[in-house]
Amino acid sequence: MKISHYVSSAMVGILLLAVFSASAMPATQAAALSEGMVGISVYAEGDVLASAGAPYAFTADLPGLSVAAKKDYACSLLSQSPKDWAKMKPRQDFDARWTVLNTGKKTWMTSGTDYKYIRGANMHTKGSVFDMPKNVAADGKIALYVDMNAPKQKGTYVTYWGLANGSQHFCQFYLIVTVK
């Protein structure tokens, strides 16, 4: 029935407005699945739902709304220093600092969670894998430091780092520097 299709679409909009505040509204994508049913995909900060770093996955199929549970391990980058595109002199010594928030359900343990170099420019000076300096409970945050040297040659460089439990990577962050 065409009326139920329009009512279903209106209900999806109302449900999304009720679930998310207007100021924090994520991007959405809707598609008609069948007569009277609409599927909704919700994206956080431009990331695809399949992204390993997205802490939540939302789906809505009328006539109901289902919300996936929070992941065991996930994070959100709160800040970094230096800021991306920082200008550096060749071989300049600096400390990279990322402050990350534990957006997962489980605590990051010093004995099982590492932050480590993943790929990109090799600017780190004192190792590529570090134990978590302290346990970080869900909704807790921590600052992670890595001693670095800017590359010798002029150019733009990106280094990728992340968090892992054993071989399971669950969070990634990066730093972009420009050597002048």
Image (tube, rainbow, N blue to C red):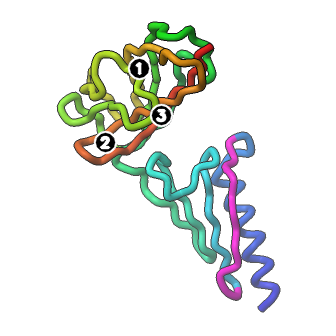
Q: Which residue is mark 1?
A: 143
Q: Amino acid at mark 3?
A: Phe
Magenta-drawn stretch contains 103: no
* Chain-order first, disc 2 or disc 3: 2
Dot in front, 1 or 3: 3
Seen from the viewer's position, the closer of residues 115 and 126 is 126
Looking at the image, is mark 2 or mark 1 earlier in the sequence?
2
Q: Residue at x 63, y 75 (%)?
A: 62
Q: Which residues are magenta?
A: 24-35
How far apart are labels 1 and 3 at the CA level? 13 Å
Q: Quadrant of the N terminus?
A: bottom right
Q: Give coordinates of residue 17: x percent, y percent.
A: 72, 54
Q: Residue at x 52, y 66 (%)?
A: 66
Give the secondary structure at mark 3: strand
Q: Which label sits in the foreground, 2 or 1? A: 1
Q: Secondary structure at mark 1?
A: strand
Residue sitting nearer the eye, 169 or 41: 169
**What amino acid is at disc 1?**
Ala
Using the image, determine if residue 2 lies above or below residue 10.
below
Which residue is identified by label 2?
106
Say what amino acid the circle numbered 2 marks.
Answer: Lys
User: Viewed as shown, does residue 173 lie left or right of 36?
Assistant: left
In space, the residues marked 2 and 3 are separated at their CA atoms by 20 Å
Is 89 or 55 nearer to us in this picture?
89
> In the figure, residue 49 lies in which quadrant?
bottom right
Which label sits in the foreground, 2 or 3? Answer: 3
User: Does 73 appear above or below 38?
Assistant: above
User: To which residue does mark 3 refer?
Assistant: 173
Kind of element beneath mark 2: loop
